[in-house]
Amino acid sequence: MSARSPRKAAVAAWIGSALEYYDFFLYGSAAALVFPHVFFSPDDPATATLISLGTFGVAYAARPLGALVLGHFGDRLGRRKIMVFTLVLMGLSTFVVGCLPTYAQVGTAAPVLLVLMRVLQGLSAAGEQASANSMTLEHAPEDRRGYFTSFTLNGTQAGQIVATLAFVPVAALPEEQLYSWGWRLPFLVSAVVAVAGYVIRRKLTETPAFLQASAADDVAALPLAHLLRHHWADVLRVVAASLIATVQTVFTVWALSYATGDRVGLDRSAMLWVGALANTVALAAIPLWARLSDRIGRKPVFLTGALGSAVMIFVYLWSLSAGSYPLVFTTGVLCFGVVYSAANASWPAFYGEMFSTRVRLSGMAIGTQIGFAVAGFAVTFAERIAGRDGANWPGVAAFTAGICLISALAAVTARETHRVPTAELGRKRAATTPRSVQAMN
């Protein structure tokens, strides 16, 4: 394997994930700030906001289905083909959102079309991270798998920054311009994403692990059947651990809606800058946490992120209720940029190392996307918990913290695999035998 291959795979994963999740998170900002006024009836603003946030979760509901389909083909045909397909699908579906007619123009057909495009976004996202993580893990040196796989999540954070910043000038427009044409501009840019994604990923080489499995005729004919027969416990473990993504959806969507609503009344642009700054800090924190996971293990780093987020979400939502911009910026950066990044940095390698090459993409895709589906709808649950006046932020914090504890418990039950050779991952013997002992046998 060329020394450049791990870097090329990591860069391709970073750029592709940044482009794809620009699209995905762009929808979140719009769902909180614009879509209630554009795609739903103006007669009941509170209900329009609730349903708009619910459409954000629709993509997460579609992701398990996408994981089943794309996971199967990713383990049958290879990681590269899925990486190209998912990025093009995301770019095109997001572009179409920017072209949709509004509720005032076509009535209930508007939210129906919006939900359809959101479903396509969810199908695309289902295969993106799992294929990119598999690609980087299988290209990476054995002692740096955590670092190289973290590029996928680092790209995700970069995409969220760009999506947030793209909405800052748009959100500053007068409401008439914002709701008529301004909100469409960031979505229309996604036409570029489809082209860029194809150019970036079409020449990426397949992973050595998958090529070796193909040459040895060791590719599973039915990856899902093999996965559920031999790795069902790890799939359930990944599902539970992936619920940690609730921190992200509550922070980026529900908290944004709550902070800029009538009860708190913080400035839209300022709150978007909180998200952008927190994600910028995360860009630096993620590779540092990932390097640490290569040294001390995946579990300690993931647990730091999960348990720390359970505490920090109370602090952040309290700062929003206090309405203090210095507090909001400080606690937002600490919560999402630093603490949550520990879990985000470690899970790509942590989850991927639970599975063998034959079912790695399927296992990661199905496990994460079921967990992420719950996390996506956590925004709607949070809105109901908060009440129509949004007063019950402690209830939202307790709900989020409880989910963090579930994720932590799942991680505690997992095996530590950071020192297991790549070829031995997913085998029972590799789960308990250190590399040094294996070398003596």
Image (tube, helix red, strand yellow):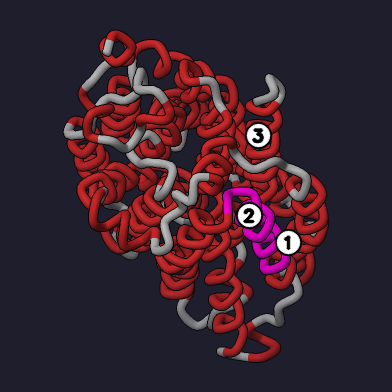
Q: Secondary structure at mark 2?
A: helix
Residue under label 2, please give it.
Answer: 26
Q: Residues within 10 Å of mark 1 (few under 14, many from 20)?
A: many
Chain-order first, disc 1 or disc 2: 2
Quadrant of the image occupied by residue 120: bottom right
In the picture as drawn, the residue positioned furthest to the front comes out as 216
- Of the pair 98 and 48, the residue shown nearer to us: 98
Pinpoint residue 428: horizontal percent, then vertical percent. Answer: 22, 34
Where residue 263 sits in the image (x, y, percent)?
42, 53
Q: Which residues are magenta?
A: 78-93
Residue closest to the eye, 155 or 207: 207
Instruction: Locate residue 396, reporting x and y percent.
Output: 28, 49
- 86 falls in the magenta region: yes
The answer for how far apart the CA atoms under marks 1 and 2 are is 8 Å
Residue type, numbered disc 3? Ala
* Relative to 130, 321 lies left or right: left
Q: Which residue is mark 3?
A: 9
Q: Amino acid at mark 2?
A: Leu
* Residue at mark 1: 187
* Marks 1 and 2 in Cβ contact (< 8 Å): yes
Where is residue 230 shown, x and y percent of the image?
Answer: 24, 50
